[in-house]
Amino acid sequence: MSSPDTSARTAVAPEPPPPVTDDRPLHQRPEDGQLLAAKLVPLRRPGQWISALALLVLLAMFVHTLLTNKRFQWDVVGSYFLNGSIVNGLVLTLWLTAAVMATGYLLGIGVAVMRLSGNPVLRSVSFGFVWLVRSVPPLVQLLFWYELASLYPQLSLGIPFGHEFAMVRTAHLFSGILAAFVGLTLDVAAFASEIVRGGILSVEHGQTEAAEALGLGRARIFRRIVLPQAMPAIIPATGNLLIGMLKATSIVSVIAVQDLLYSSQLIYNQNYLIIPLLLVATLWYIILTTLLSIGQFFVERHYARGSRRGGSGGTGFWQLFRGNIPLFGASGANGAAGGRSGRELAGLS
Amino acid sequence: MTGTTTLTATAAAVEVHGAHKWYGANRVLDGVDLTVQPGQVAVILGPSGSGKSTLLRAINHLEQLDVGHVSVNGELIGVRRHGERLKELGERAILAQRAGIGFVFQGFNLFPHLTALENIAAAPVATGRATREEARATARDLLERVGLADKADAYPRQLSGGQQQRVAIARALAQKPGLILFDEPTSALDPELVGEVLAVIKDLAGSGTTLIVVTHEIGFAREVADLVVFLDGGRILEQGSPAEVLDNPQHPRTREFLSRVL
């Protein structure tokens, strides 16, 4: 069945083109001069121009509506921006975030070390803690701690199952702010422990062995050798968690803790200026997040000592900024520092 | 070379007796007896998987033997005799013993976040055996001794493999060890860099420190070794002077190995 088919095809097939007579290497042939003189025409990429144009139009519309829609009430935003109770809320948000992160990380490092220890009981407890805390939404945890009094009306200190030395009533103990602190700290500890554990595991075992061979003790090896090398892996994730926690503290508004968001809510519940006051809170969150991102950049650069990416000089902050936002960068020559975005959209500037 | 006399402690004698080690069902060491006299250079040869590294690592207690014991200058390593039993030492005691034994790794294992100078000075300062200034001065001497005086402030990543290994040797020397263990110190190096590292080790061989070197460099063994040990399947099949083991091997496995390596 196939044989007549193929024969028919060969019959119709055209003659192969005659072989090129000039079989010298290309650079010895006469047309070589033209090749050397020819100008390279870059591949046209209309898709890039169209998508860039579309996004610029959308951006312009966004800016336009921000400026022209009277209902944003920017004058009200301005007048409440530094309002006393807003600033108090801001301060509470800041120190709650700081306290939660600091305590959470200390706890988290402990949990991570437990998880990596040779003791099966410590390992299991650590795993169980992380599993439980990560499984319960922070909001639910927060409510549990706030309502602890109805579960355990009193807490006491003493010998397990035996004599009690001291006792407190939980109704007085767990105010909203303490419930918020404990709930969020446990949450941070669980996530931080996984971040720290990942960082520790990223350090080669040979480093620990070399330090052991030099006669360094385990605690010192962890502090001086392993942890500094784990930092480059820990910091970006920690920056993420810190920024996330700064915003996540806003859930304390449900248990009437006067943070940045709840302070705004208290005001708009009275004057009904909902949008402007939400904007006040939003702007503050944006400002704080921006500051934290900048801080993260410098911490990352510090710990990049001796690594390929950081080197001794490192990439400057503004170089990096321009690399990521090429429209403000003017020069297209920052390809090496700015990476792909700088080069690919260079044609636009 | 100025530091030679001040930087080395008295050479240590090493004795391994009846060493057995299993990894699960896999027998890595199967009754090794080895004696190295103070100031001797012992070279351990053998195919991969023969237990060379495990033996070396047992000497400074990076590995615990299942049966048998190691002693340096007559002092048991990692254990203490308690009547009929051997009790494992606590962390502090083991650290103190290790501090007198240098170890040079195949993969250098320099600390990447510290400069060459800091790599060498860190441990003596951290363990309280030298002040910061003393340790840094010693480190500079040692860098000069391994020919890297100009690289004090370089990070490991900025050094070639050969330079990294020379810094690692200087780091081991900063412990003022009576014994230095080398675990295939040139195996991770490009061929043209092997010579500079071997030259540094040869220089140490003349200084009176006891050296135990696991290597595949037969030429180095012939030139420097006082004792050549051939290990296969976790047993010492042959040991003696280079002339005996390398030039006139008695065991067929040794002959086969040497014919493949040379």
Image (cartoon, rainbow, N blue to C red):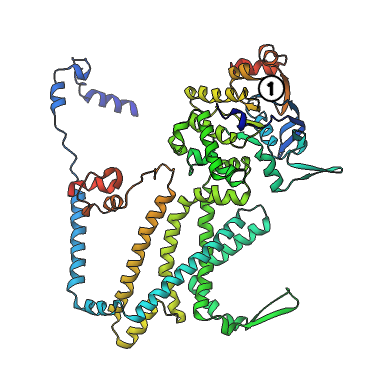
Vertical placement of B197 versus B108: above or below? above
Foreground residue, B155 or A147? B155
Mark 1: which secondary structure? Answer: strand
Return the residue at label 1. Answer: B230
Quarter where residue B252 is shown:
top right
Quarter where residue B179 is shown:
top right
Q: Residue at x 19, y 45 (%)?
A: A45
Q: Is residue A191 left or right of residue A297?
A: right
Instruction: State how many labels appear.
Output: 1
Q: Is residue A80 left or right of residue A130?
A: left
The three-letter code of the residue at mark 1 reads Phe
Q: Outermost residue toward the top?
A: B248
Q: Position of residue B202 (x, y in %)?
A: 58, 22
- Give the crowd class for mark 1: few <14, some 14-19, many >=20 residues within 10 Å: many
Q: Residue at x 21, y 66 (%)?
A: A62
Residue B107 shows in the view: no
Foreground residue, A162 or B22? A162
Q: Residue at x 19, y 78 (%)?
A: A70
Q: Position of residue A5 (x, y in %)?
A: 29, 28
Q: Position of residue B112 (x, y in %)?
A: 49, 42
Q: Position of residue B73 (x, y in %)?
A: 75, 33
